[in-house]
Amino acid sequence: MKNNLYIALFAASALAFSSCESDIDNYMVDDTVGFLNSGLVETEVYLGTDDPTKVYAIKAGKGFQSAQASITVDDNVLTAYNELTSTTVKLDPLPADCYTISVASVTLTNDDYRMPFEISWNRDRLEAALAENPNQAIPLAMTVNTTATVAENRLTCLIKPSVAVPYVSFDKSGLVKAEVPTRESSSVSELYFKVNANFIAQRDINYTLEIDPTLISDYNEKNGTNFEILPEEAYELELEGNAIKQYLSSGMFKLTFHRDYLVPDKAPSKFGSYMLPVRLKSLSSSNIDPEKNYMLYAISVEALEVSKSKWSIVECNSDINDDPDATDAEKAANGPDALIDGTTSKWWRSIYRYSQDMPYYAVIDFGYKTTVAKVGFQIPASSNRRYANSKAGHVEFSIDGQTWTNGGTWESPSAATQSVEFEVTPVEARYMKFVIDTPFKNAVSGAIKNPNATAIGEINVWGEAVTWED
C-alpha cells in the first residue's frame, strides 16, 4: 500500500514539473538573430596594437535554434543612414584598404547566444584617412540562415572608427596623501594601488616601477615644500613582476608600509614630511601615459601640541613680581606663569618701569622628558597686543636643567603678528629656555621707561611626551 502511494506521489510531482517547464516555454519568444548593436557604432582603434574590433551577432529567445550569419559591406546601408539622419554631417564610406573583415561568417549553435565577427585594421592607413576626414564608416549588412526569427530591425550597422593612443597610467597619479601614522596604527600596512590601461589588454602587459627622487625635488621647488624621501626601512615595494592581465584593463601593485620605523613603540617618532616617488619605468607593450606616469605617496609624521598639565616656570629673568611698584593685579595677570596658562587673556609682561637689558628668558620644566619638534608663541589678546615687542630670539634645551644645547633661532615678521611658529631639529628634553634677544623698537612711552619692554601671551610646544620610559 505504501509503495503504491509513493508511486502516485512521484507521478504527480513529475507531471507538475513537466507542466511548469511547458508554461515557461509558452511565455518565451522564439529565437531572433541580428546585430548586438545596430545603427551607428563608434569604436576606438588603438595605434601600435594589432587587436581586432569585434562586432557581435546575437541570438535571443528560447535558445533552441541554431543559426548561420554573415556580414558584407553594403553602401546602401550608408545611403539609407545619411537620408534618415537629421544631422548636417554625413558619413562617407571608409576606404577598403583601411581594414579587412577577417571573420565574416559565424555559426551560433543551440547553446550560443552571441558570436563575434572580426575586423582587422591597417592602422597607418586608417590614421591617415581619418586625418583627412573623420566622418567615415564601414556599412555592414547581415544575412541570416536560420529556422529562428530574423531581427529585421537589427540587420545593419555602421562601424565608425577613431584612432587613439593606447596608454597605461597610474589610477591615482600625482600627490597621494597617506593617513597620518600614530602608535595606534597597525605596525605593518599592506596598500594596493591600481595601474590602468585605456583599453582591454589582449595579452599580459608587464610593467616595471622605479623610485625617482627627482620627482620630490621638482615638487618641493614648485610648491615650496620640504618633503624628504621615505627611508627604505619604512616600506617594501616590488618594482618588477607586476602586470595587467589579458582581457583586463587594470592591474594592482602592493606597497607594504612599516609604521614602526617612523613611529616606533618605544622610541621617539621621526617627525617630518616624507614622500615615496614611484614612476612607471617600462611596459612590455603599449605606451606610458606622459601625464599620469608617476605617484607621490606622501606620509606626514605630525607633531601634536604637547599638553601643559605638568609644565612649570622654574626661572624668568624679567619678572613683574620683582618690580616693587607692581600692583597685585599686575602680579596676578602678568607674571611668568601667564606664559603657560593656556590663554592669551593673561600675559607675561617684562619689567617696564625701569630699564633692563636683553636678552629676556623663561625656563620651562615640561614635568617629564619630551620630544620637541616645533615651538611657537602668541602675543597678548585684544588691546594688550600693543605691548608686544619681541622681534627675534632663540630656544635652548636641556635634560637636566644644567647643560644646554641651542635648538634654533626664531624671528617674528612684525610686532603685530599674533602667532609665530618655528620648527626645531627634534630633540629630547626635560627643560626649554625660551629667549628673546631683540626688540622691534624702543618702547619708552608714558609710564614705560624700559626701551626693551615687551610682552608674550602664550608659549606652545609640539612633539610628544616620552611615555615609553614610564
Image (cartoon, rainbow, N blue to C red):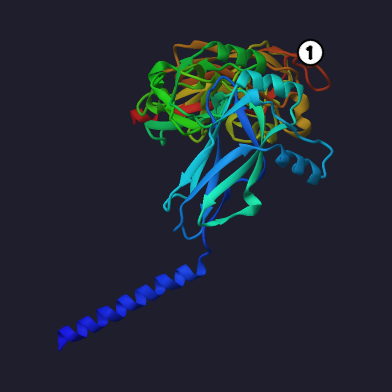
SS label for mark 1: loop
Examine the rendered structure and indicate whether residue 346 appears above or below residue 47. below
**Residue 68 seen in this snapshot:** yes
* Quadrant occupied by the C terminus: top left
**Which residue appears at 45% of the width and 69% of the height?**
24
- Seen from the viewer's position, the closer of residues 448 and 150 is 150
Image quadrant where residue 305 sits: top right
Quarter of the figure with residue 161: top right
Q: How many labels does the image show?
A: 1
Q: Residue at x 37, y 31 (%)?
A: 187
Q: In the picture shown, does residue 51 fall above or below 63?
A: above
Q: Position of residue 238 (x, y in %)?
A: 39, 21
In which quadrant of the rendered view does residue 86 lie? top right
> Would you call the spot at circle 1 few (<14 residues within 10 Å), some (14-19), or many (20 or more)?
few
Query: Where in the figure is residue 95, as x and y percent of width and height?
Result: 69, 26
Relative horizontal placement of residue 37, taking residue 244 as reference (left or right):
right
Q: Is residue 315 visible?
A: no
User: Camera-side residue: 225 or 464?
Assistant: 225
* Foreground residue among 234 and 377: 234
Question: Is residue 382 shown above or below 443?
Answer: below
Which residue in the protein does label 1 denote? 442
For this rendering, which residue is in front, 262 or 256? 256
- On the image, the x and y values in percent for residue 352 come to 73, 20
Identify the amino acid type marked 1. Answer: Asn
Counting from the top left corner in percent of width and height, residue 221 is at: 64, 12
Q: In the picture, which quadrant includes the N terminus?
A: bottom left
Residue at the far bottom in the pictured view:
1
